Amino acid sequence: GVEYLDIAFRTHDPVDYIIIMLGTNDTKDVYSASAEVISWGLERMLRELKNLMRDSLSQEAQILIVSPIYVRKNSKGNYYCGFSKASEEKSKKLAGYYKPIAAHYGCQVLDAAEYIAASQADGIHLGQEDHKILARTLARKIDI
């Protein structure tokens, strides 16, 4: 996501809030990345974002980091393509790594897994009701 951050940020400047939710796809086996290594990607994104904000109309924008929901098996008892038990375990550790990074960069944090879970359809994505719950939770968090 860092490669697209510059254009995404500059085309939406000014903003009041920036919400970042990432990490699920990084738990795929093909990347062989630990939860700690995945969290380094978040930290890199925050460094880049803070640099962009310095020269923008959004210098006072608030940043909310959302740690993702947990990977799990689908209703057929399988993991979605590219994911595994190791992915599930890594996904459960992300919030623990994200929280201190968020604090270091002065960001708010929300652990999505405290409110919602992956759909049984594929064990990765949100179902319709969980999208609504997440939207309401985010709205309360940013006080809109």
Image (cartoon, rainbow, N blue to C red):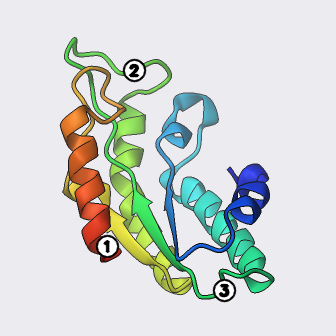
Residue 57, how many percent across, how many down? 71, 82
Q: Which residue is mark 2?
A: 80
How far apart are the alpha carbons under marks 1 and 3?
20 Å
Q: Is residue 99 above or below residue 32?
A: below
**Residue in the foreground of this view, choosing between 129 and 111:** 129
Q: Which residue is mark 3?
A: 59
Q: Is residue 14 above or below residue 112?
A: below
**Residue in the foreground of this view, choosing between 45 and 100:** 45
Rendering quarter of residue 8: bottom right
**Residue in the foreground of this view, choosing between 12 and 105:** 12
What amino acid is at disc 2? Tyr
How far apart are the alpha carbons under marks 2 and 3?
39 Å
Give the foreground label among 2 and 3. 3
How far apart are the alpha carbons under marks 1 and 2?
35 Å
Sequence-first tag of 2 and 3:
3
Name the residue: 60% across, 28% down.
30
Q: Which residue is mark 1?
A: 144
Task: Using residue 140 as the reference point, say whether residue 53 is left or right of it.
Answer: right
Sequence-first tag of 1 and 3:
3
Label for residue 84? none
What amino acid is at disc 1? Ile
Q: Callout 3 environment at 10 Å: few (<14), some (14 to 19), or many (20+)? A: some
Task: Using residue 21 as the reference point, say whether residue 134 is left or right of it.
Answer: left
Residue 118, how many percent across, how many down? 27, 36
Q: Is residue 61 above or below residue 122?
A: below
Task: Using residue 129 as the reference point, say whether residue 6 is left or right of it.
Answer: right
Q: Is residue 66 above or below residue 49?
A: above
Give the foreground label among 1 and 3. 1
**Residue in the foreground of this view, choosing between 53 and 25:** 53
Rendering quarter of residue 2: bottom right
What amino acid is at disc 3? Gln
Name the residue: 65% across, 74% down.
14
